Amino acid sequence: MLWAMSPIVGSVYLVSYNEDIDEFCATVEIEVPQNVAHLQLELEKFGPNAYARNLTNPKPGPASIGVLGCGKPNVKFGDLIQGKCFTMGELPD
């Protein structure tokens, strides 16, 4: 099997900040292409303490990925978030 990486872009759909505990949560909407084995977001835009679960063998189509972190988020509704999409394919002849 050959693994191929391609960039993918999602959009911030929801951002919530809880001032009492100094934490945020956000949702990134992304369109998953066919034959994806692994998808991960680049979280730098959210700040240094952001965490998101990677998607493994996601179904093609729209998907939501939750992002959590400490502090105020550095993103707002509609911001574009880069990601990496890894697909599996057959070795070329």
Image (spheres, rainbow, N blue to C red):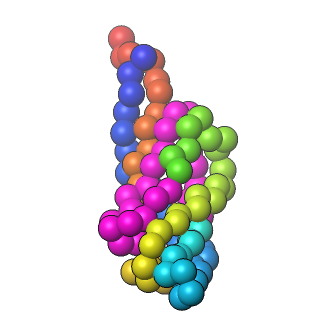
Q: Position of residue 60 (x, y in %)?
A: 64, 44
Q: Position of residue 75 (x, y in %)?
A: 44, 80
> Is 53 left or right of 1, judged from the image as shown?
right
Residue 80 visible to the viewer? no
In which quarter of the view is residue 16 placed? Answer: bottom right
Q: Residue at x 38, y 45 (%)?
A: 6
Furthest residue toward bottom: 19
Quadrant where the N terminus sits is: top left
**Residue 20 on the magenta span:** no
Residue 32, compared with residue 64, is above or below; it is above
Residue 88, compared with residue 83, is above or below; it is above
Residue 55 visible to the viewer? yes
Q: Position of residue 29 (x, y in %)?
A: 59, 64
The magenta span reads 28-52
Furthest residue toward front: 21
Quadrant where the C terminus sits is: top left
Residue toward you, 80 or 46: 46
Residue toward you, 40 or 59: 40
Q: Residue at x 63, y 59 (%)?
A: 64
Furthest residue toward top: 93
> Is 37 left or right of 46, judged from the image as shown?
right
**What is the number of callouts on the image?**
0
Q: Position of residue 57 (x, y in %)?
A: 59, 35
Residue 28, compared with residue 84, is above or below; it is below
Q: Residue at x 43, y 79 (%)?
A: 71
